[in-house]
Amino acid sequence: MLGGIRGEVLAGPERRRRWSTEEKLRILGQSVAPGSSVSLVCRMHGISSGQLYTWRKQFRTGELTGFAPVVKLLWWDGQGLCLFAKRLERGRFVWPQAKEGSVSLTSAQVSMLLEGIDWRAPVRTWAPEAAC
């Protein structure tokens, strides 16, 4: 820091800084802390508010964490406990909120959950593209 001015030197052809996921999450945390403002956090880190809002959107959709939407279901089939796991390439899983640590779903709700359909309003959370 020289004379109160913070700067960054980028060597080579790279024009943009690459932020790690941990750095992005830390900056997002600072932007929602009590008493902070988006513009102040952006100035502190040399980013635009548009970049910060893009990271917020990515965080909400699960893109920022690097984890794809995954659901794991446990059920008793009469002989033993079964585990089913599914990862969505697109869309998201929608399920009821747990009030006591577990959720009971009807077979119809499980079917819609696994297809990425919101069981409250049966509409796909993404539209499949036509095969070429």
Image (tube, rainbow, N blue to C red):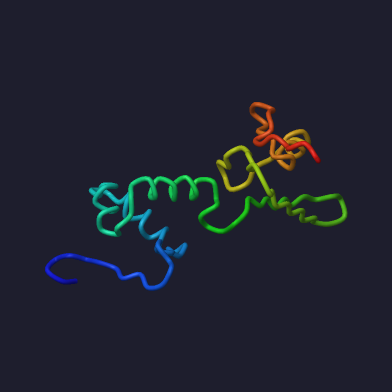
**Residue located at (25% from left, 58% from top):** 44
- Quadrant of image for the C terminus: top right
State the residue at coordinates (69%, 33%).
124
Could you say where residue 39 lies in the image, as x and y percent from the top left?
26, 47
Relative vertical location of residue 28 with respect to residue 114 in this rendering, above or below:
below
On-image quarter of the N terminus: bottom left
- Residue 6 vs 117, above or below: the answer is below
Lateral position of residue 121 relative to residue 2, left or right: right
Which residue is at the front of the view, 101 or 116?
116
Instruction: Say if 127 sits above or below 58 in the image.
Output: above
Q: Is residue 70 above or below residue 95?
A: below
Residue at the outermost front position = 13
Q: Toward the viewer: 119 or 105?
A: 119
- Is 27 on the left or on the right of 62, as rendered? left
Quarter of the rendering containing residue 50? top left
Q: In the rendering, at what x and y percent does residue 94 appear?
A: 63, 39
Identified at 85% across, 50% down, the residue is 77
Q: Position of residue 115 (x, y in %)?
A: 74, 40
Q: Residue, x 66% and y 52% (percent of image)? A: 70
Along the line of sight, the residue nearer the viewer: 34 or 75: 34
**Furthest-right residue in view?**
79
Q: Total number of numbered labels?
A: 0
- Residue at the outermost left position: 3
- Residue situated in front as seen by the camera: 38 or 12: 12
Q: Please give left or right for residue 99 compared with residue 108 in the image.
A: left
Picture quadrant where residue 93 is located: top right
Image coordinates for residue 91, horizontal then vertical, percent? 64, 42
